[in-house]
Image: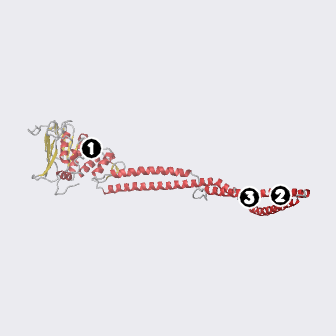
Amino acid sequence: MMTTKEEKPLHIVELRAENVKRLHAVTIRPDGAMVIVGGKNAQGKSSTLDAIEMALGGGATIPPDPIRHGARKGRVVLDLGELVVERNFTTKGTTLTVTAADGTPQKSPQALLDGLCSSIAFDPIAFARMPEKEQDSVLKRVLGLDFAELDAQRATSFASRTDAKRELKGLEARLDAMPALEAGVPAKEQSAADILAEIEKYQAARADNAKARAFVEELEREHRGLGSDLVALDKQIAAIEATLAEAKTDRESVAERRDKTEATIQRKCLEVAALVDPDLDEPKARLASMEATNRKVRAALERKRLEDEVRAADQLADKLSAQIEAIDDRKTELLASAKFPVEGLGFGVDGPTLNGAPLQQASQAEKLRLSVAIGAALHPRLRVMLLRDGSVLDEDGMRQLAELAAEHSLQLWVERVGDRDASAIVIEDGMVRGEAIVEGAAE
């Protein structure tokens, strides 16, 4: 992001740090776009860059114990030309003041610094050496593209769709294994109770008919017996004249009874002749075939249930696919609306891309150029960047870095092990080599 003519880039004109981490007291007045901080390990190189980061970033950039061991308080002062930033550290906490060059205090100092430099902690060298996944995460954070919630939603929908499709395949397999339905199968199982009641009714009717027949047979037997009695009586009449009158009376009585019986027999015979026994074979056959029909009904109902489940599972899979597509579309929209700091920069499946190719395939020079451009985009006004692993760069890399710093109007503070760089500010035992501790500075 280029600044306007009215807003010249801000650089650190002077750094003063006292009793911060490993630093006793240092004063550095940078000269040029590259500020190389050299020295052996554990001497205060990192603490010098940390002092800048803590002064500007505050908050999470300040460790729990920022004060040098043995001191009671510490301080960092950054002269930015137009502004002076001072952050003080005590055992109770930290305070920040930002004043204009004329000494006028500025309101909301941390918010002011955040507006000047959105990410003092971005390190181009570290970014260029990151794995693809980490570069992808950092770059999206730089662009304000937080896909965490969308990715979580997509992962949930994807897992649900996988489960739904797995269930769908199982249901389809079960459905395919079922036999085809026969035509004319009833929609529901039949009840045997109605047929059993019908059979019971028919059996009762047959029992009544049997009783009627038995009664007629009994009357016929009685009729035959009465005939025999008449024959015997006739013989008695012939043999016993003395009892003729009585026998005649008996005969008349028996004859009368026989006549009545004969009339009843004739009437009952007509009734019995009209009786028709219900056919038990047909309902019994229906009862026997009912279970086979009901098995087909159950099979049809089970098939319909599976078809419904298959339809529901298919609809669920389609719905989840639509959700995943919507999430992917939303991510595409966000990416399309993002303002990339470098032309040709984009995102692939595995990480950032440059001109359509994976960033990891770019040359070291291209990676460094891209990384510095991204860092520059994060520093809208205060064009200061901290590079903590400068030792990985050779002479060509350092020369390229200097060119990029000039191109983007950046002030690069580069930490390098050793003192081989002629222009390096060497830190020894928490001080700039060759400087003495200012009396009263360290407490």
Query: Which label's residue is closer to the chain start, 1 or 2?
Result: 1
Q: Which mark identifies residue 90?
A: none
Image-based side of 409 in relation to 164, left or right: left
Specify the amino acid type for callout 2. Leu
Q: Nearer the viewer, mark 2 or mark 3?
A: 2
Residue for badge 1: 126
Q: Is residue 66 above or below residue 168?
A: above
Which x, y percent locates residue 40?
20, 35
Task: Name the foreground residue: 153 vs 130.
Answer: 153
What residue is drawn where x is 69% and y is 58%?
Answer: 205
Query: Which residue extends farthest left?
Result: 439
Query: Which label's residue is closer to the chain start, 2 or 3?
Result: 3
Residue for badge 3: 212
Which x, y percent locates residue 384?
19, 48
Q: Are marks 2 and 3 in contact (CB under 8 Å)?
A: no
Q: CA distance from mark 1 to mark 3?
A: 113 Å
Q: Which mark identifies residue 226?
A: 2
Query: Which residue extends farthest front?
Result: 242
Residue 49 at least partly seen: no
| Mark 3, secondary structure of its residue | helix
Q: Are marks 1 and 2 in contact (CB under 8 Å)?
A: no
Q: Residues within 10 Å of mark 1 (few under 14, many from 20)?
A: some
Task: Name the foreground residue: 400 vs 270.
Answer: 270
Q: Is residue 66 above or below residue 211?
A: above
